[in-house]
Amino acid sequence: MTRHFLAGEAQPRYSAARRETVAGLGALAAEIGAEFVVVAGDVFEANQLDPDVISRSLEAMRAIGVPVYLLPGNHDPLDAASIYTSKLFAQQCPDNVTVLDRSGAVEVRPGLQIVAAPWRSKRPTADLAAAALHGLPADGTVRILVGHGGVDRLDPDPGNPALIRLGRLEDAIERGVVHYVALGDKHSRTRVGDTGRIWYSGAQEVTNWDDIEPDPGHVLIVDVDEDDPAHPVTVAARRVGSWRFVTLRRRVDGDRDITDLDIELDALANKERTVVRLELTGTLTVTDRARLDDCIYRYDRVFAWLDLWESHCDLAVVPADREFSELGFGGFAADAVDELVGTARSADAEAAADAQGALALLLRLSGKGAVTGDDRRSA
Ligand SMILES: [Mn+2]
């Protein structure tokens, strides 16, 4: 998965972290005695991928050690160009990896079945989970349904025939046909309905900002009691992801607020695996703004990525009364500074921004403000 804001070496490190998290499931599977792992679709971002990505991903899955069942989802459907039927996949697929390429029940061992609802195209015309469950008896067999896509209760969209109908899942659970439903599509851990048996685990590593994706980076450990005829389940989340995409919304109205922001950024752990988007509001002097820019520039080098979320920032820069009087200008130069200060305070937003920029540069070049990356680049 490519993240546009991860510049330079951050993207390959992020991609590697996503694979390492997968390979790291081997230790977790051994620790808890997991019998197998299911991945509920969108294993791959697309059917056409760099061969290196496919090979490395399959190596990561090999390292899990226990059987791994992959469900084709909407990103990697079983269509004519499917990654799962490619020569490369066939050559490199480890012995412990199985593609759930047929709708319906697959026997894992006597008394235990996976019920698969693979996607064959990006736009199914029916509830594939319901179709996969169709006709299965309540005969005491433990069944795990692996499905993909939106659920009608969470994503009501009457025009989407592919939505999984929660009522049908709950009915199958009630009848004892199926005992756990592993869903994929949402990247954030999400419980569906009230049975406690239907979950989206979410992505193993964060993929989006925290306001869109509040709870990523987990796997779910599902324990099915095979002795109890009702086959009750316990579900426990284990955090396995190591990256964070954080949005910080803060008010900055002066020196003290910038210091607080600096302290807050400094305190964030795991900086090289943390991406920070700053949503700042406030009114700053030219000197404060230069200090803020310097702070952002310094942290951008330490974090995986850090910058202002420009479209959501509302930062006004208003020159303070005596901000430029100590620079020692006289005569013509002093008049020019006065004029710039006047323009910087004016209602003409574009001219004001240009004047603020000129004043900030003047402060920096005179040694009163911080020299930022922007200055270096323009220099
Ligand atoms: Mn999906």
Image: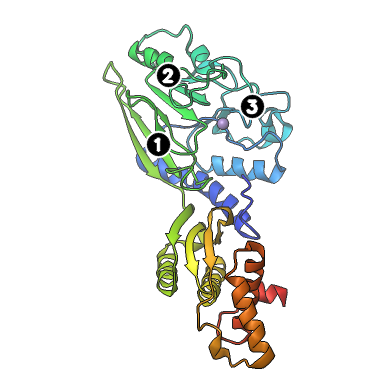
Element type where label 3 sits in the image: loop
Question: For residue 53, which quarter of the picture?
Answer: top right
Element type where label 2 sits in the image: helix
Amino acid bearing label 3: Pro
Q: Nearer the viewer, mark 2 or mark 1?
A: 2
Q: Residue at x 47, y 13 (%)?
A: 133
Q: From the viewer's side, name the closer residue of 107 and 10.
A: 10
Q: Is residue 185 visible?
A: yes
Distance of mark 2 from mark 1, alpha carbons? 20 Å
Q: Is the residue marked 2 within 8 Å of ligand 1, measured from its CB?
A: no
Element type where label 1 sits in the image: strand
Identify the residue position indicated by label 1 in the image. 220
Query: Residue 166 got which mark?
Result: 2
Mark with earlier residue (2, 3): 3
Residue count near mark 3 (Cα–Cα under 10 Å), binned few <14, some 14–19, many ≥20: many
Mark with earlier residue (2, 1): 2
